[in-house]
Amino acid sequence: MTSLSINNIPRQRWLRILPPILITCIISYMDRLNVAFAMPGGMSKELMISVSMEGMLSGIFFIGYIFLQVPGGKIAVHGSGKKFIGWSLVAWIIISILSSIVTNYYQLLGLRFLLGVAEGGMLPVVLTMISNWFPDSERGRANAVVIMFVPIAGMISAPICGWLLSVASWRWLFVTQGVLCLVLLAVWYFTICDRPQEAKWISNKEKQWLLDALSKEQAEISSDQSGRKSSLMSVINNKTMWHLTALNFFYQAGIYGYTLWLPTILKELTNSSMGKVGVLAILPYVGTMAGMLLFSFLSDRTGKRRVFIYIPLMGFAICMFLSVYLKNDVFLSYIALIGCGFFLQAAAGIFWTIPSHIFSAEIAGGARGIINAISNIGGFCGPYAVGILISLYNQDVGVYSLAVALAISAIFAWLLPVSCDPHKEKPVLSMREKTT
């Protein structure tokens, strides 16, 4: 047992660690979204980009995104995630500015690939940092707060991008992004700490409780995993890791298919200007915040991870289907798109609690990297498939394909092993489940 109760300790971590991580993730996601607004806002016309090329441009980011996933996770465990993201920010600044002066599609395609490389290690790094600061009883909510960067970035990007496109060229979207990254670099350097042991501001009471809780958590995992090798190869041979990867592959296809095509879908649905599209895109992301808070709270409260991953995924699939099925009624179709937003990231924070629960701390960072690296190929496939299907058939077929991908992801969630629920008798993988 820990020597202190969670109810009588300070909570400085929630105010000192989460905000700078959240802000960094917001800026990184805005970097991904700006191209979604730039394409219908004049970029495609100026650079002569076809619909299928738009799909490739949206998805190529995720091919580059693969390369630093595992190195990023391992560096965060054994080195400094703070320094890793600091250098990543420098790269984001350079790439954003260069994107504002491109003269053809292929230059932009190359820069989007490089941006994916530069952002690739971010998620496993920040999730590892979260696991350094928050034990399992708090981790679902902490992850949800950080992953809230998706709706917040959408809420900020939508009106700003819409306004900028109504008064200036699409190139200013990338200039603005570079400036934001420069400001963030200073904030990140002076505020973040990798681990509790390095922080001077944390009270002794909070630090002791936290270190005791994390030590107990790792002791339980080590005890259950006795006799097994704590190596990256043991992760690769693990059935549950591949199950999680498959689930997240189809989830990411749905997420990025929706977010990167949302401005185009709204423009087609409402026949509106980009300024109005930017305003209409806010409500789905307001819904995202509500969904993430609700499901992460329910999951942490009940200890049921699998159920509260499955429900949002199936809800997302149904709303995606209805957004097309009801398209003749603009209002109802828009309500369905808001429903998509509500379920958009509701499963994500809960999903990312599982690796730190079934793997020891020394290999959990690498496990996150492998899962995120492979599954984010779905982030390429989703937008690219939509672009291809629109060019071959129509927009309806493209959106229906996203609903199918999300339904498949929900099925994988339903079939997750019982060991993924932390409050069961066996909190980690059983011998039957552990490896192929």
Image: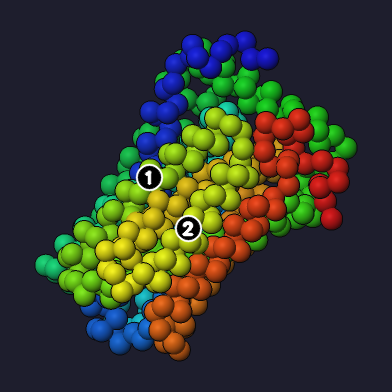
The quadrant where residue 33 appears? bottom left
Q: How is the image coloured?
A: rainbow
Q: Position of residue 18 (x, y in %)?
A: 42, 35
Query: Is the N terminus in the top left, top right, bottom left or bottom right quadrant?
Result: top right
Q: Along the line of sight, which residue is nearer the eye, 170 or 259?
A: 259
Choose mark 2 or mark 1, whichever is in front. Answer: 2
Query: Is the C terminus in the top left, top right, bottom left or bottom right quadrant?
Result: bottom right
Q: Which residue is mark 2?
A: 316
* Amino acid on which the number 1 mark rests in the picture: Met
Give the left or right position of residue 333, taking residue 343 as reference.
left
Q: Which residue is mark 1?
A: 289
Q: Along the line of sight, which residue is nearer the eye, 342 or 319?
A: 319
Residue plotted at (47% across, 82% down): 389
Q: Position of residue 420 (x, y in %)?
A: 68, 42
**Above/below status of 279 relative to 45:** above
**Above/below status of 314 relative to 171:** above
**Above/below status of 117 relative to 16:** below
Q: CA–CA distance between discs 2 and 1?
A: 14 Å
Give the left or right position of residue 360, taking residue 389 as reference.
right
The quadrant where residue 3 appears? top right
Residue plotted at (34% across, 56% down): 338
